[in-house]
Image (cartoon, rainbow, N blue to C red):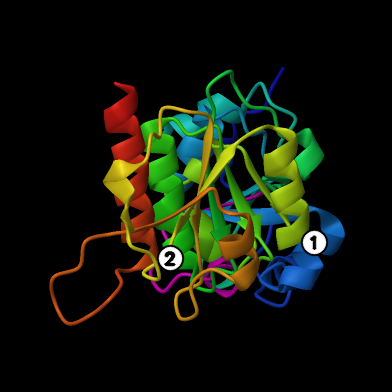
């Protein structure tokens, strides 16, 4: 009979210095996450979305002092091969990377795929983001990708990784619902060419408006780093380099905002 985790009164871990807690803290480091192929999902909303996307947590940690014991998450993982541990409030506070944790934290497989594992539909629309540093921007682009049904989001020459807990938080868990991959810019260019995608590069260094391009074709929209924009390689390989109309004093928008505008223009054209 499957145990009812919500009804278990005993705490499995009470000490903040427990080895399992130290392991969770260590997963905040990218090299540790990549070495183990896992990442952390923290927060009820993010964990719920991950479960909706079919993610099977390897381990679930919850703090009874912070969670509702009758929460539906317990019922949803009863049939999964997930080990569940209950933590004291001090232990959970040590494991958590949030200022105000809600008592839910899970260890899951890293959501990133290899480029050769990505598949796209017959009329694909892909977003490529190059060397994005801020997890919040990656997360915002993932929410746009999920809302618009993009085939994939690819990080070219990545700075922030897809398994960064702050990317997962900023994406509200949508990183698990959208196929994501990463690779050096040159490999990403080769993958786009292999799949016959028109490359549309968003850059202020262009005279062509983004609304003038036929985005109903199989396309990849490319946006660049917050400070430097896209690298010179994209200017060389882009089928179109497009700009957003800017009538103020600044010449560019936040990268997540720019990506959303171009993606939604593609959706407008396609519908």
Numbered-mark total: 2
Would residue 188 appear left or right of 73 to someone viewing this image? right
Query: Does the rendering let one see residue 82?
Result: yes
Query: Does the rendering let one see residue 66?
Result: no
Mark 2 or mark 1: name the one nearer the start of the chain.
Answer: 1
Indicate the quadrant containing the C terminus: top left, top right, bottom left or bottom right.
Answer: top left
Q: Quadrant of residue 157?
A: bottom right
Q: Residue at x 27, y 31 (%)?
A: 268
Q: Alpha-carbon neighbours of circle 2 within 10 Å: few (<14), some, or many (≥20)?
A: some
Tag 2's secondary structure?
helix
Residue 15 place in picture, x, y as percent: 67, 72
Indicate the quadrant containing the N terminus: top left, top right, bottom left or bottom right.
Answer: top right
Q: Alpha-carbon neighbours of circle 1 within 10 Å: few (<14), some, or many (≥20)?
A: some
- Name the residue at the right extreme: 35
Q: CA distance from mark 2 to mark 1?
A: 20 Å
Would residue 260 appear left or right of 175 to someone viewing this image? left
Q: Residue at x 67, y 45 (%)?
A: 111
Q: Quadrant of residue 83?
A: top right
Residue 56 place in picture, x, y as percent: 67, 33
Q: Quadrant of residue 53?
A: top right
What is the number of the mark on residue 34?
1
Residue 195 place in picture, x, y as percent: 69, 32
Specify start and end residues of the magenta stretch as a single range: 92-107
Would residue 52 appear left or right of 111 to someone viewing this image? left
What is the number of the mark on residue 136?
2
């Amino acid at each position: 009979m499957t145990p009812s985790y919500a009804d278990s009164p005993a705490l499995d871990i009470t000490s903040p210095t427990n080895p399992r807690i130290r392991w969770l803290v260590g997963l905040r480091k990218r090299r540790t996450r990549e070495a183990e192929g896992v990442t952390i999902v923290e927060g009820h909303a993010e964990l719920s979305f991950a479960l909706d996307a079919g993610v099977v947590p390897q381990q679930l940690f919850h703090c009874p002092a912070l969670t509702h014991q009758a929460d539906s998450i317990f019922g949803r993982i009863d049939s999964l091969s997930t080990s569940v541990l209950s933590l004291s409030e001090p232990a959970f506070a040590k494991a958590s990377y949030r200022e105000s944790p809600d008592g839910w934290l899970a260890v899951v497989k890293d959501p990133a795929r290899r480029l050769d594992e990505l598949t796209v539909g017959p009329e694909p629309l892909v977003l490529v983001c190059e060397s994005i540093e801020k997890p919040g921007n990656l997360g915002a682009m993932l929410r746009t990708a999920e809302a618009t049904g993009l085939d994939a989001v690819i990080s070219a020459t990545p700075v922030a990784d897809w398994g960064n807990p702050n990317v997962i938080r900023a994406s509200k868990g949508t990183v698990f619902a959208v196929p994501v991959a990463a690779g050096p810019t040159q490999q990403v260019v080769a993958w786009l060419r292999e799949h016959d995608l028109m490359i549309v590069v968003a850059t202020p260094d262009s005279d062509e408006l983004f609304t003038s391009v036929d985005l109903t074709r199989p396309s990849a929209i490319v946006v660049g780093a917050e400070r430097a924009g896209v690298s010179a390689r994209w200017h060389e390989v882009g089928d179109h380099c497009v700009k957003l109309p800017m009538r103020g004093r600044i010449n560019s928008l936040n990268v997540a905002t720019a990506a959303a505008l171009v993606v939604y223009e593609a959706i407008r054209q396609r519908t």
